[in-house]
Amino acid sequence: MKSPQRILLVGAAGRMGQAVIAAAERQPAIVIAATCNRGERIDARINDCGVVVDFSNADATQEICVACTRAIKPLVTGTTGHSAAAKALIEEAARVIPIVAAPNFSIGINTLSWLARHASNLLGESFDVEIVEAHHREKKDAPSGTAKRLAQILGGRKAGELVIHSIRGGDIVGDHTIIFAGAGERIELTHRASSRETFALGALRAASWVVDRPAGLYAMEDVLGLSGQ
């Protein structure tokens, strides 16, 4: 019988960290072997795990990347709001270890990204495109990392003209809508998350997938087999 995948969860005290812990309790092939929160040393906990899952904050990126590369442990990170320097640290670490970096681990939102890419190619520049995203009032970064990723996918068609509208209020888990507006018609692609469980399950799926990969920087689309389609 195969041993459960042992995870070090960074940012365990946060909303997403708690969702990952709850989801892992229902996954017999996965165990949260250790947790780490702000002010606690990652390198003191990393050796007893097979993969690191990070839902902390961008300020911890350097410490996490250094610890993972030293211990040669795969990394799954869903932290958003990275600076250019932090993104460079992740890319550098990915030369040594496999990393799945995704602003959103939902299977649905990654399917939305795939649909958006194909819709953009089919509709062409005669359709204007805008993105509307909504999250809870305590989310610090705006636009969301998911909205930025969607804009990156769509940006090649109308560079500089794509606008992201951000809404922050209440306890909204995460809504994203892409609007394609043409002459006399409009197409809207929408994903609404009602529970953080969908993100947690996706992150655990990525954690199981990444352990068998060579060093490199991967997206959730790679985990789901959507890249290149």
Image (cartoon, rainbow, N blue to C red):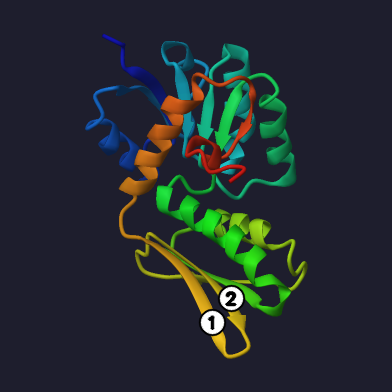
Q: Callout 2: 10 Å neighbours few (<14), some, many (20+)?
A: many
In the foreground, 110 or 73: 110
Q: Is residue 143 visible?
A: no
The residue lying furthest to the bottom in this view is 184
Q: Position of residue 228 (x, y in %)?
A: 62, 43
For residue 180, the mark is: 2
**Measuring 72% from the left and 28% from the top, which residue is drawn there?**
92
In the foreground, 33 or 225: 225
Secondary structure found at label 2: strand
| Amino acid type at mark 2 | Phe
Q: Is residue 38 visible?
A: yes
Q: Position of residue 50 (x, y in %)?
A: 44, 16
For residue 97, the mark is: none
Gap between marks 2 and 1 measured at Cα? 6 Å
**Measuring 57% from the left and 54% from the top, which residue is drawn there?**
145
Q: Position of residue 190 (x, y in %)?
A: 44, 67
Q: Quadrant of the N terminus?
A: top left
Residue designated by label 1: 186
